[in-house]
Amino acid sequence: NAGVMQNPRHLVRRRGQEARLRCSPMKGHSHVYWYRQLPEEGLKFMVYLQKENIIDESGMPKERFSAEFPKEGPSILRIQQVVRGDSAAYFCASSLSGQGSNQPQHFGDGTRLSIL
Amino acid sequence: GESVGLHLPTLSVQEGDNSIINCAYSNSASDYFIWYKQESGKGPQFIIDIRSNMDKRQGQRVTVLLNKTVKHLSLQIAATQPGDSAVYFCAENIAGAGGTSYGKLTFGQGTILTVHP
């Protein structure tokens, strides 16, 4: 059984460029979450999506950041006009169900984003 | 704001000893808790979870204890092995209106567990 797959594992961008991070959830999972982790810190929630719907984006900056989870294909976290402060590890998680039940979230190995 | 935090940032043990990692939470509305293990360069790996209607749950070599009175969570690892060396995070899920859970996890800062052979 394939776990949560994220790509690329490492991404280097120059200031002002766009970064696209992809996440394919575990088979059968329809709930996707994105988290951000700075060095020696815990993960911080960014956004929670179901297929074609954003359920909770309370942790995502209002500008430059967007996320989608289309009917077909992976979930995408997009960061426009990147700045040095965007450098971090971005983790995606998926769960079998979300609202209304307690199901563990299973994480991918993340994308390490470095901004030059 | 309300958050999940850890008492001890680092823990060093000898192989074969039992390890206890602690976590305090402040949100009484939290209804679901998860322990994750994170190795260098990898994502958090699910270890064990517990719902707020329980006070203890056991897995293979791990036990999670929940004390809602003092809002405290602990992870016990029996017969700790060098492969258990990692950063351990507790995470909480806060129940929303009507008892539903929103799925959003709030993580603590982590405890570094080092196991010496």
Image (spheres, coloured by chain):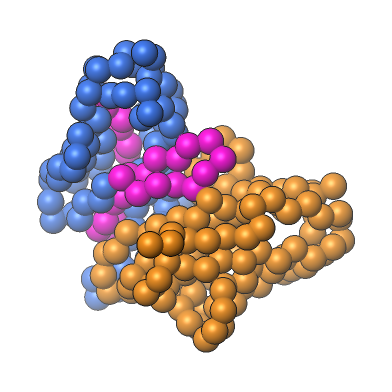
Chain colours: A orange, B blue
Q: Is residue B72 visible?
A: no
Decide: is A25 above or below A72. above
Give the magenta range. Answer: B19-47
Q: Residue at x 52, y 44 (%)?
A: B42
In-image side of A47 versus B49 (left or right)? right
Q: Quadrant of residue B60?
A: top left
Magenta stretch, main secondary structure class: strand
Quadrant the N terminus of chain A occupies: bottom left
Toward which corner of the image does residue B89 lie, by quadrant?
top left
The verdict on residue B39 being magenta is yes
Task: Say if residue A3 shows up in the picture.
Answer: yes
Residue B50 image point, x, y percent: 21, 51
Q: In the image, B91: left or right of A64?
A: left
When asked about the image quadrant of residue A8, the answer is bottom right
Q: Tell me how many marks there are.
A: 0
Q: Is residue B75 magenta?
A: no
| Residue name at image x 56 percent, y 66 percent | A23
Residue A16 x/y as whole percent: 87, 61
Observer-nearest residue: A97 or B106?
Answer: A97
Relative to A73, is B10 above or below?
above
Q: Residue at x 69, y 50 (%)?
A: A10
Q: Nearer the viewer, residue A45 or A77?
A: A77
Percent across and percent down for residue A84 are 79, 49
**Residue B111 to residue A102: above or below:** above
* Residue B67 left/right relative to A55: left
Q: Residue at x 33, y 72 (%)?
A: A97
Q: Position of residue B35 (x, y in %)?
A: 32, 44
Left or right side of B19 for B56 = left
Residues A55 and A114: in front is A114
